[in-house]
Image (cartoon, rainbow, N blue to C red):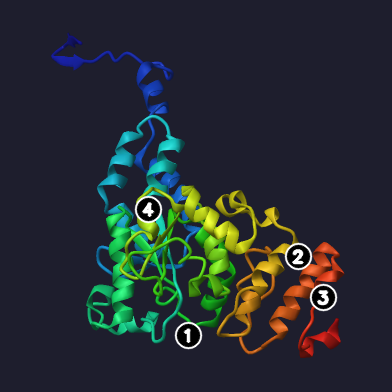
Amino acid sequence: MTLQSGVCTFYVDIIPANDGFTELRKNYLSPSDTVAAIDAVIRRILKNCPLVIINVTTGRLCDGPERIRIFKADPSFKELVSSMTTEVDNERTLRVVAFFFGYVMFSHVWQGNEPSFQDINDVESKSVWNLPDTPLNEKLRNFCKEVRRLGHNWAWSDTCCIDKSTSSTLNQSLTSMYKWYANSVATLVFLAGVAHPSKSGDLARSIWMTRAWTLQELLSPNVIFFYDSEWKPYLGDTGSNHKESPDIMQELADATEIPRGTIVTFSPADLGVHEKLRLASMRSATVEEDVAYSLIGIFKSDIRPQYGEGTDALGHLLEEIVARSGEVTVLAWSGKSSSYNSCL
């Protein structure tokens, strides 16, 4: 700065465009960019999650947007955003998001008037914790308590997490269920008819082993826990995954007549068409269409559920299997024929 006739004259150096400050800004990741990257991971995770799920802390049913809102109010989200100032840490982002949104699935045999989607929403607090004290409501609460004890936030039960009054929601749930079990952090199996203390063979002889839907609930999860009627671990096994229990897996292998390793790491390609149908033939369903619908994931089928079609549902499934595999021998059934036979 110089003085000329009482006037201050400032000389300002022109800062080169590529100075250190500009370079610093180039390397800086704005919070909005960080959030956008996290949002992309959230969308990818939720795409493979159930539509509605139970928050085991509040007991309330939550859809995807509500789970996102809860996550963004959680300290883990704020810590994740603040930790990434120069670049997105994709590995950490996936780990944090997957952990927060991880959910536990329920597998059981329906025992009557189970608590429904409407039942929970009709309670003033809209919480499973405030449902009337009945044995079946208590079964649901015990499941949620066990999920919470295992350190997870979210739980899914087919009784109350599907709005069965909406056909589109019901159909999407039926066709996605295999994927939901496969992507769960764990599946808890409640064996209502197995007394405590349980003994070897109780699982193989349980009603759970005879139901159509429970076949995929056995095969698709990576982590599974079996509980007796008092919610105690089957055979007293307190391990971190009953699929790693040689005794339990051998019991299941003997009962199903498929290799133990196949049960542990099952994928639909592991078994042939005849073997899958053999397993299905050992099970039954209260609603006849469920014989077919429960196999959608195991066969990677594209059939559309439509309750009311009766035994034709199985016919549609078999038709698709024949078209894909060319194995016409799957139609070599014995017993009473259905109305669908005339179409084959």
Residue 102 point in image, percent of width and height: 40, 54
How many residues crowd around disc 1 within 10 Å: few (fewer than 14), some, or many (20 or more)? few
Q: Vertically, is 150 above or below 17?
A: below
Q: Nearer the viewer, residue 296 or 171?
A: 296
Q: Is residue 279 left or right of residue 243?
A: right
The residue wearing badge 2 is 274
> Is residue 243 at least partly visible in the picture?
no
Gap between marks 2 and 4 measured at Cα? 33 Å
Q: Residue furthest left?
A: 6
How many residues crowd around disc 2 within 10 Å: few (fewer than 14), some, or many (20 or more)? few
Gap between marks 3 and 4 measured at Cα? 42 Å
Q: Secondary structure at mark 4?
A: loop
Q: Residue at x 71, y 79 (%)?
A: 314
The residue wearing badge 3 is 331
Instruction: Indicate which disc residue 165 carries.
Output: 1
- Name the quadrant of the N terminus: top left
Residue type at mark 4: give it.
Asp
Q: Secondary structure at mark 1?
A: loop
Q: Residue at x 37, y 66 (%)?
A: 228
Gap between marks 1 and 4 measured at Cα? 39 Å
Counting residues from the start of the chain, the first of labels 2 and 4 encountered is 4
The residue wearing badge 4 is 237
Q: Residue at x 42, y 20 (%)?
A: 17
Gap between marks 1 and 2 measured at Cα? 35 Å
